[in-house]
Each structure stands twice: as C-alpha cells, then as structure tokens.
Image: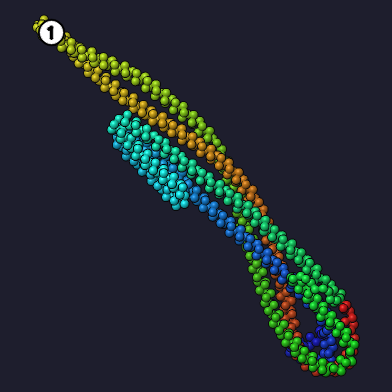
Amino acid sequence: MVLKYFKAVVSSRNNNHCCNLINVYYIKKYLFILTLESHILELREIKNLFSTDIRGGIVMKLRTAVISSYIIILVALIAFSSFTILRSNESLVAVSFIQSNIRVSVANMNQIKTDIIKIQEWLTDAAATGFPDGFDEAEKYYQDAFKLIDEDIQRKISADKPELADKLTNMQNKLQLYYSTGKQMTHVYVDEGRDAGNIWMAKFDPIAEELGEITDEMMATYSGVYDSNLMQLESDQKNIINLLILISGIVILIIVLAGIYVSVAFSRGITLVSGYSNKLSENDISVSKSSKRKDEFGRIANQFRNSFQSLNSLVSSIKSSTDTTAGIKDSLAASAEEASATIINIKNNTTVLLQESEKMNQNVTDNVTSIEEITANINSINNQITEQASMVEESTASITEMISSLESVNNITKKKSESIIQLVEVVNDGSRTLTEMADGFKTGVVDRIEGISEMASAIQQIASQTNLLSMNAAIEAAHAGDAGKGFAVVADEIRKLAETSAQSSASISKIIKEISDGVNETEIKTKKSSEAFDVINSEIKETKQAFDGIALSTQELNVGGKQILDAMTMLQDVTINVKTASGEMTSGSEQIVRGQLVLKDISDNVTKGMMEISSGSEQIVVAADEIVNFSVELNSVVESLKEEADKFKT
C-alpha cells in the first residue's frame, strides 16, 4: 500500500500536474518504511521475474529447435533436388543420344542396304543390255551409300564411339571393293561374254556376301546400343524413384525425431524448473544441488539456485537485522547517507538496465520479423508442395494413358505379326509358282523352237535342192528347143517356188532367233523376280522380328509404366504428409510470434517501470535526509518484516 502511494506521488510530480498536492512531511514519514518494506516486496516479486526468465528461455529454446529443424529439412530438400536434376539431365543426354544418333544411324543403314541392292540391280541390267545408263545409275547409288557411311563415321567420332567408327570404315572399304569388282564384272560380261563374266561373278559373290554380313552386323550393333541405352535409362528412373522414397523417409524421420527431442527436452526442463517454482510458491528457499544440464533450462535452474542462495542470505540478514534494531536506530543517519549513495548507484544501474531493456526490445522485434519471414517461406514451400501434388496427379494420368496406348500398340503388333506370317506364306507360294512356271515355259518353248528350227533347216535344204533342179530343168528345156518351152515354164515356176520357200525359211529362222532371245531375256527376268522374292521374304522376316521386338518392348514398358504409376501414388501420399507437416510448422511459427509479442509487451512494461524508478530516485535522494526522524516507527516496521521473513524456509 505504501509503495503504491509513493509511486502515485512521484508520478504526479514528474508529470507536473499536481505538485501542490505533495506533502513533503508525509513523504519523509513513509520513506524509511518504504525502504524496509521494499525488502519484503522484493521477495514477493522475484517469482514474477523468474517466470519471465522461464518464458524467455522456453521461447529461445523453441525458436532454436524450430530453426534447426527448418535448416535440416531445407538442406535435405536442396540436396535431393540437385541430385534429381543431375540424374534427369543424364537421362536426357541418353535419350538425346538415342534420338539424334542411333535412330539416324539405323535409318541410314537401311538406306545403305537399299543402295547396295540397287547397285547390283543396275549393274546386272547393264550386263544384260549393254546400255551405259545402268553404270550411271549404279554410280549414283554408290555415291549415296558412300556419303551416308561417311556421315555416320563422323557422328560416331563426335559421340566418342571409336569402335563403331572403325567398323563403319571397314564397311566403307568393302563397299568400294564391292562396287569396283561389280563394275569390272559388268564390263567383262558386256565385252567378253557370259563365260568370262562368270569368272568374275565367282569373285564378286563372296564380296557381296561379306558386305551383307557387315551390314547386318552394324544393324545388330545399333540395336544392342539402343537396347543398352534404354535399359540404362530405365535403371536411372528406378534409382531416382527409390532415392525419392528414401529421402522422403529420412525427412519424415528427422521431423519425428526432432519433435520427440523437443518434447522430451521441454518436458524434463519444465519439470526441473517447475520444482524450483513450486518451492518458491511454498516460501521454501532452501538450496539444492546445481543442475548438470547445459541448455536454457539448466541455466534457468542454476539461476534459481543462485537466487535462492541470495534470498537465503537476504532472509538471514533480515532476521539478524531484527535482533539489532537498537543499533540500527543509532546508525540511521549514517545509513541514510549510505542509502543516498546507494540510490544514486541504483539510478545509474537503472539507466544501464533501461538501455539493455531497449536493446532486448529491439531484438524481440527482429526475432518477430525473422519468424514472420520463416512463416512466409513455409507458406511458399506449402504452395510448391501443392503445385507438386498437382504435377504428380497430371503425371499419373499421363502414365495411365501411356499404359493404355502401350496395350493398344501391343495388340496391333500381334495382329501385324500374324499378318506378316501369312504374307511370308503368300510370298513363298508366289516364288514357287513363278519358278515352276518359268521352268515349264522354258522346257515347252525351247523344245518347240528347236523342232521349228530343224523344220526350217529342212525347208531351206529342200528349197536349195529345188532351185538346183529348176536350173537343171531350164538348161534341159533350152537344149530341147521348142519342145522344151513348156517344161521351161514349169522349171521357172519351180525356181520361184524354191526362192519363196528359201525366203520363208530365212524369215522363220529370224523369228526363231528373236523368240530364242526373248526366252533368254524372260529367263533372266524370271531369275531377277525370284531374287526379288527372296529379298522380299528376307525383309518380311526382318520386319516380323522387328514387330516381335516391338511387342516385347511394349510389354516391358507396360510393366515399367505400372511400376512408375505405383511409385507416383506413393509420392502423392508422401506429398500430402509433407503438406500436413508444413501446416503444423506454420502453426508453430505463429505461436512463437505470439510469444515474442507477449515478451515485447513485458519488455515495454519493464522499460516503463525503469523510467519511473529512475525519476523517483531523485526524490528518494532528497528525502533520505529526513529518514532519521522516522526511527520511532522503525519498531513496528521491523516486527512486520520479521513476520514476513519467518515465513521462508531456509
């Protein structure tokens, strides 16, 4: 009650509103009582001071734990994002290599095979007809194949594939040998005939066969590189998914462990500090053992212990002071002077405390700003997680559509494979029918041509003999004179008939020769058609193998797509959990901000109190000179002080 009255008086004087109401005598009367009563008030208000320290320590501990958790989660997310981007870039490089190199190489290799076939066809045509156009066309296809191989060599060198470049160089050399040998063979066929050309054919066939083997080997090599890159790409995707699951589990584990750690640490620390608070509420200031904890709770507990020691000493001093009241009366004057000096020191200390309080207030403001920034970052992360969840849903829908498309492609591939099998049978039947028809045609026509040729020869011989007989008859008719004129006419008719028969025989021989040439040309074209059927059959078989490979690949992609779909579902669940945890962290940050604002209000109140104490200290110094006059009332105050001190357990 005295303290409240004194504060009201000092405050009114500082504000210069009611200076005329101040009774100096009344202040002097209660000044010394206030000094003694302040000791009791100090004991009562220590609890509130410690409660403030406890709140500040707990808020500091919570803020440190939350910031540490945020830093750990942020570092984990950055590391995971960096690794995911790196592996995704590697996968994109592999896909780019497949698309820009292998696909082009396979397409070029198919074109090279076509050019090689065209070279052989045009050289064969030139050998059969003798026309130079076949050489020009063969040269054009040779240059095209040579250029494609050279471009593929440059791509392999740029892609750091020296072994493939060496194989292509060998293929290019074989192509040169193939073309030069085929060209020479064609010239021999045209200039020297079939027998000489067949000798070169024996040299040409092994080269053509070896070139075909090299071409097939390159196609198989490209297929192996393609399959290897696809397998590596699938392996990288699986590793990324597994790492995503692992990192998510680790982040969740860290959050759980951090929560457990903070909960256990706070529970034990609060229990430790609550023990001191309970003792203080029961006026028990007995000193216990010091705490071994190194955190904020341990420091608060040790501050409690040190304060209890100070309180213990203070209470003992008060009890001792009550036994020496008479001596205190005699030394009040000296004590007043000492009190005046002490008040000056208190004023100076209050000024320092006021400055520190202002600094603490500024720190609290900075902390609130930092926590608000952290909350904004958490909200940003929450938005990113929401976007990621949407992307996961879109990816899941796309993968589902891809699986449906793969199943459709697989069904179509199976149907086309069955159609190819039927086409192979049709081609084989056509080839056999063509061969049988060519053999029958050759046998029937050649035999009949030979018979007709023999008859034409016989007619020619008969015509020659008839012509000779007609000449003899004409000579005899001339010798016979007029009697032989009729015979001469008959002989002339016989001669004309013989000449006509000879001309007809010559025409028949010419026609037979043309028919024979046509039969030979038909035989050559029949062989070409048979070879074309063989090539078509081979291409159809390769196409069937390609369809079988596509069917197998689509089945594998279908299985992989379903696995990716399962993983995306798991990722969606993890994203929801992370989003929930982010919301909880946001709520925790808001609680910290509210705690900091409460701490700021307390700091403002302490600052105001310090200012009031500083202004009141001047009045206390002036009034200290009158303390001696209040020694009469000292006994009652000392008795009251003794009663308060006896309440504490030491």
The quarter of the rendered structure image containing the N terminus is bottom right
* Residue at horizontal 78 percent and vertical 68 percent from the top: 269
Residue 381 point in image, percent of width and height:
63, 61
Q: Would residue 415 be seen by someone viewing this image from the given angle?
A: yes
Q: Is residue 371 above or below residue 546?
A: below
Residue 580 seen in the current view: no
Residue at x-position 61% and y-position 56%: 388
Quick one: label 1, few (<14), some, or many (20+) residues within 10 Å?
some
The quarter holding residue 85 reads bottom right
Q: Which of the 4 image quadrants contains residue 111?
A: top left
Q: Position of residue 168 (x, y in %)?
A: 43, 45
- Residue type at tag 1: Glu
Disc count in the image?
Answer: 1
Residue at the far top: name it: 483
Q: Report the residue at 89% width, 79% height from top.
A: 647
Q: Is residue 576 above or below residue 419?
A: below
Left or right side of 318 for 587 = left
Q: Which residue is mark 1?
A: 476
Horizontal and vertical percent position of residue 348: 72, 87
Between residues 160 and 628, which one lies in front from this camera angle?
160
Residue closest to the far left: 481
Left-right relation of 330 to 615: right
Q: How is the image coloured?
A: rainbow
Q: Quarter-wise, where is residue 53 in the image?
A: bottom right
Residue drawn at (81%, 84%) of the image? 4
User: In front here: 405 or 131?
Assistant: 131
Direction from residue 61 to residue 239 in the image, left or right = left
Q: Secondary structure at mark 1?
A: helix
Q: Position of residue 641 (x, y in %)?
A: 87, 84
The C terminus is located in which quarter? Answer: bottom right
